[in-house]
Image (spheres, helix red, strand yellow):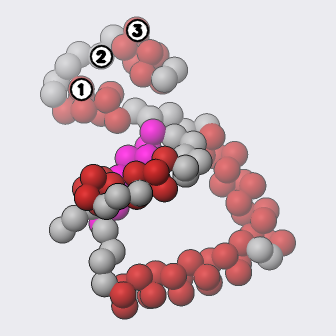
Amino acid sequence: EMVVREAIQQFKGFRYMTEQLELCSAAGRRVLLETPWMGRREEIERQLAKVTEVLEYLCSAEGERLVGNIGTKLEQLRDIHATIRQVGEEVVLDEHRYYSELCR
């Protein structure tokens, strides 16, 4: 199954569109690139209906408060993907490596 990363390479103009997105983290970008590509009309329409439902909620006062809280929490996240990979490769992590990973 094709993912967004492959669609960017395949469809002209799609790279430009994805580069215009304001992604706040490396983790967010990785999730976007690994998202399955939707190619069927029914699938796209079903997802658009879900987006509409979420947008209506987010426009409410409760939704606005929730977005503010989530934004604050997401800004505090660190991408530790490389650290996790190193642990899986049984690399011994010293304090220098650990802290340099956190500060990226």
Count neighbours of disc 2 (C-alpha within 10 A) and say few if under 14, some if 14 to 19, many if 20 or more: few
Count neighbours of disc 3 (C-alpha within 10 A) and say few if under 14, some if 14 to 19, many if 20 or more: few
Please state which amino acid type lies under the numbered disc 3. His
Asked if the stretch drawn in magenta spans residue 28, the answer is yes
Q: Is residue 51 above or below residue 64?
A: below
Which residue occupies the foreground of this view, 102 or 15?
A: 15
The residue singled out by tag 3 in the image is 96
Q: Report the magenta residues as a range.
A: 26-36
Q: Which mark is residue 93?
A: 2
Q: Are marks 3 and 2 in contact (CB under 8 Å)?
A: no
Residue beneath the point at 41% across and 57% down: 13
Q: Are marks 1 and 2 in contact (CB under 8 Å)?
A: yes
Q: Is residue 57 left or right of residue 21?
A: right
The residue singled out by tag 1 in the image is 86
Q: Is residue 46 above or below residue 69?
A: below
Q: CA distance from mark 3 to mark 2?
A: 8 Å
Count neighbours of disc 1 (C-alpha within 10 A) and say few if under 14, some if 14 to 19, many if 20 or more: few
Asked if the stretch drawn in magenta spans residue 93, the answer is no
Which residue occupies the foreground of this view, 60 or 89?
A: 60
Q: Is residue 55 left or right of residue 102?
A: right
Q: CA distance from mark 1 to mark 3?
A: 14 Å
